[in-house]
Amino acid sequence: MRYVIIGGCAAAVGCIEGIRSVDKEGEITLVSSEPYSFYGRPLISYLLEGKTTKEKLLAYRPADYEEKNGVKAIRGVSATAIDAAAHTVTLDNGETLPYDKLCLAVGSSPFVPPMAGLDTVEKKTCFTTLDDALKLADMLGDSKTQRVLIIGAGLIGLKCAEGIVGRAASIDVVDLAPRILSTTLPEEPAKIVQRHIEKRGIRFHLEQSVTEFAGNTAKLSGGDVIDFDILVLAVGVRANTALAATAGCEIDRGIVVNNMCATSVPDIFAAGDCTVSTDPDTGKHRVLAIWPNASIQGETAGRNMAGTKTVFDKAAPMNATGFMGLHYISAGVYEGEGLLTHNSEVYKMLYVKDDRLVGFILLGNIDRAGIYTALVRERTPLSSIDFELIRDTPQLMAFSATERAKKLGGDKV
């Protein structure tokens, strides 16, 4: 069996491991447009912050990972077209790869809206790849004199701000939304995070957009004028679908896949941020662009490419991150009855609907968040556990002995 994987991040790793869990001998070829081995992309802000190094980022998998798994890696090369009838992939170096099963783990790319005068800005970058982080580090230098303007107050923009807060003279963040983290947090917890970040000197300009750039000056829709030295574009990302379209795959904001991670074209699978899959809580197709889902999707695709029938039907919108020492985890959907615990140090909201925990937000104290995550992902009936106990202090004693044994690896407690 000849397997080809296009992409080099979490979904690609999951696909390799899924294939090898079933097929130990098949040929695996991986094609990645980046020149690097696998790395932890969500950690690039820590490189700027000095909490990690390029070498440590590239140690996401052991140096001999590809050799041990029999993977032929073609890096620094992009796939340009798929001939689904001929079962071939064309690369931009002129090479053509035959495949029996193909996985598209091509991720997403930064979305840069049209902005007048953007071409007049000399020092600018996005912030989604290791090369972006290295470019920003080079522009910042060691002088701590550079003024940075970030467009976008979502996860990418705020992680960038966190990474450079000790390396820049000033940081301004502009966003059209009325609050930061507008796609992941409701108003109240978003305000808590904003106040925490502002204590580090970062300035927010919300409900505003850039109407025009003139060199190192940005004019905002609200009338503000911001002078800067470096521009970071972190408005958002869009799923990479162009390659899948050449094969005739169904596209709807992302590559449409079923619960076996198969596309609409035979023998072509897809996984990770490039895909649209079904949210089990809403029944709607949506992009669930988070690292754990990408990894599990990739493994599901790999196992099915190798001939099993494995289903991935427990996708859950989830974010686990932190900004300048304030950590938060959220998962699921924010609907149903909201059960709030809130004081100066902790914000906890549990969303209950139809005898299930359908979502939650933990801000400040995130201890034992894995139990809440499991309840959401496994769709556990709350009537089957001691929910009053788990509501106040998540602990395994809220589960039956059998369930505790499963969660602890098989031994009854």
Image (tube, rainbow, N blue to C red):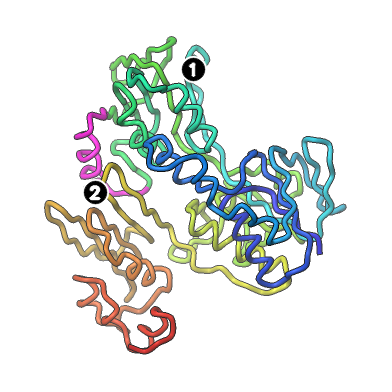
Question: What residue is disc 1 on?
Answer: 118
Q: Are marks 1 and 2 in contact (CB under 8 Å)?
A: no
Q: Main secondary structure of the magenta part?
A: helix
Residue at image point 75% right, 49% down: 248
Report, in whole angstroms, how far the alpha carbon at label 1 lies from the one at label 2: 33 Å
Is 36 on the left-hand or right-hand side of 282? Answer: right
Judge whether residue 193 is colored magenta. Answer: yes
Q: Is residue 298 left or right of residue 146?
A: right
Q: Residue at x 40, y 12 (%)?
A: 216
Q: Nearer the viewer, residue 152 or 131?
A: 131
Residue 75 placement (x, y as % from top left): 69, 42
Which residue corresponds to mark 2?
A: 189
Q: Could one spot residue 78 in this view of the protein? A: yes
**Residue 404's spot in the image, x, y percent?**
35, 83
Residue occupying image coordinates x 49% and y 12%: 120
Segment tinted magenta in the rendering: 184-203
Work out whether residue 240 or residue 64 is closer to the camera in this orientation and state it. Answer: 64
Report the residue that reaches farthest toward the left: 344
Q: Secondary structure at mark 2?
A: helix
Quarter holding the N terminus? Answer: bottom right
Q: Secondary structure at mark 1?
A: helix
Q: Amino acid at mark 2?
A: Pro
Location of residue 101 by image quarter: bottom right
Q: Earlier in the sequence, mark 1 or mark 2?
A: 1
**Residue 265 visible to the viewer:** no
Name which residue lies at 34% across and 43% down. Answer: 182
Near mark 2 (Cα within 10 A), the count class, few <14, some 14-19 or many ≥20, is many
